[in-house]
Image: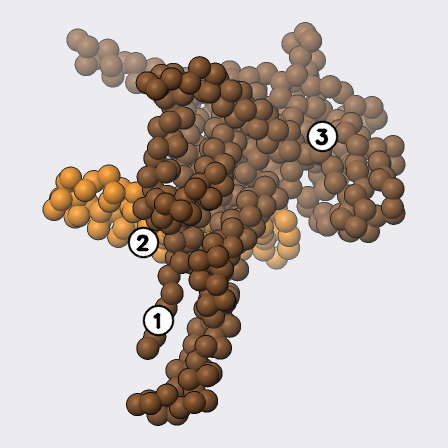
Chain colours: A orange, B brown
Amino acid sequence: MTPEAAKFIGAGLAMVGTFGPGIGIGIVVNGMLNAQGRNPEASGELFTNMILGIVFAESVAIYALVVALILIFAV
Amino acid sequence: MTRNRAILVVVVVFAMMIGSAFLFRVPLPHIQLPAEWIPGTPLIHIPLIGPFYITNTVIAILTTDLLLLVLAFLATRNLSMVPSGMQNVFEMIIEMWHGLSVDMIGEERTKRWLPLVLTIFLLVIGSNWVELIPGYDTIGVLCAEEACRPESEEHQVRLGVPAVAFAQGDDSGADALGAGDETSELGVEAAVEGEGEGAAGEATLFVADRSMGPFVLATRRAEPGEEGYEFVPFFRVAASDLNFTLALALIVFVAIEIVGFKALGLRYADKFIAVSWIPGFIRGKGGHSRIGLLANGLLAVLVGILEVISELARIISFSFRLFGNMFAGQILLFVIPFLIPFLAVVPVYGLELFVGAIQAFVFAILTLAFMSAALITHEEH
């Protein structure tokens, strides 16, 4: 296996790490929808908190993406 | 009847999308992590720091700054009690952030730190949105291989004291300067030709197509024997340059530490280097066993070390979150027209708009959130 091929396979494997954040974001939005159902008036503040939660979960996916990008472009 | 017509429109659009994939030859663009040097600008050696050259992200940030200054001027030209127009927009933004900031870090600190938070927000959202103007990343310079390297002697500018020479740090994969462009219906490229010939090598070379009058297009990649040039766009999203995001992350890190120290004094350092339990342990605080105090104390030291690591990881997280989102968005915007030239980019464009705004918002609000977290003391006993 050439290093080139190993690079790309590694990049593909690194993106498996986006599994978790995907589920995590789903859980965050689930909580938000439940809370909105119980208390529609607090939607604005709940939305802000939901965005924060989504961003935290997404950063982990971004870490995986960065590893993949480093493998493809900078190794 | 209108339902049938709607179906007909959808079918026609899909047919055009698929047809354009065969009709238009959009070259696969060259994507690289480091920002590209603008050929022709000098390479400046700053004493004690090293070489510095003007990249296309620097130019993008400068245009963003200019744009923000112009908008600010327009907003404050005729200030009135009942705002309208640009003043209204800015008042909305400032009001939103002022409200959030007072909630999170209090009235006093808001006066001191809100300008920083707003600057971060406006700068990041400005530089993310200005990327979406057609012409960004597609208008640039076609330069031959030699003219694309900043290290060639004629471009060097040395300031005074001999500089500390850092290795350029380019790996073999990244020494090809250039980025692709697409001849989709969105834009044509104006390009300037460099001298010499391009060798095949590692670079992604495009053939200079001069069939469109004064404009030189890069419409396809060069075959190994052909004369090709590298493409360097004039502008590139500032946040896709890790230098920019890292600089912002470091500024935010320093600001958060300053907030912590100003609010708590030296007890803030106790969060990281836990020594406040030692006097209690030596004196043998009444009611607690010595061993218990020691155990708690050592635990606090360990937790302190973890806190230090988490603070430093925050820098990485801040910078890479913005970088990853913008860089990946750019790649999407490049690659999708390569696959389907007609119309398929439009949803991605909308996503980029949304993501750019959200990432700016998140950067600023995480600054506020971590500042407010730095104000909390952990009282144990």
- Left or right position of A54 against B5: right
Front-most of B187 and A45? A45
Residue at 64% over, 33% down: B58
Query: In the rendered image, which residue does mark 2 sit on?
Result: A24
Task: Give the CA distance from mark 1 to mark 3.
Answer: 55 Å
Q: Nearer the viewer, mark 1 or mark 3?
A: 1
The chain ID associated with circle 1 is: B
Q: Nearer the viewer, mark 2 or mark 1?
A: 1
Q: Is residue B84 above or below residue B175?
A: above
Task: Verify CB contact (< 8 Å) between mark 2 and mark 1.
Answer: no
Q: Earlier in the sequence, mark 1 or mark 3?
A: 3
Front-most of B67 and B339? B67
- Left or right position of A23 against B17: left
Task: Give the CA distance from mark 3 to mark 2.
Answer: 42 Å
Q: Is residue B282 above or below residue B132?
A: below
Query: In the rendered image, which residue does mark 1 sit on?
Result: B379
The chain ID associated with circle 2 is: A
Expressed as whole percent of the image width and height from the top left, the position of residue B97 reads 37, 37
Task: Verify CB contact (< 8 Å) between mark 1 and mark 3.
Answer: no
- Left or right position of B309 against B218: left
At label 2, the amino acid type is: Gly
Expressed as whole percent of the image width and height from the top left, the position of residue B131 reads 52, 28
Task: Give the CA distance from mark 2 to mark 1.
Answer: 31 Å
Q: Is residue A10 visible?
A: yes
Task: Verify CB contact (< 8 Å) between mark 3 and mark 2.
Answer: no
Check chain identity for marks 2 and 1: say if they share one. Answer: no
Query: In the rendered image, which residue does mark 3 sit on?
Result: B38
Q: Quadrant of residue B137?
A: top right
At label 3, the amino acid type is: Ile
The quadrant of the rendering that contains the N terminus of chain B is top left
SS for tag 3? loop
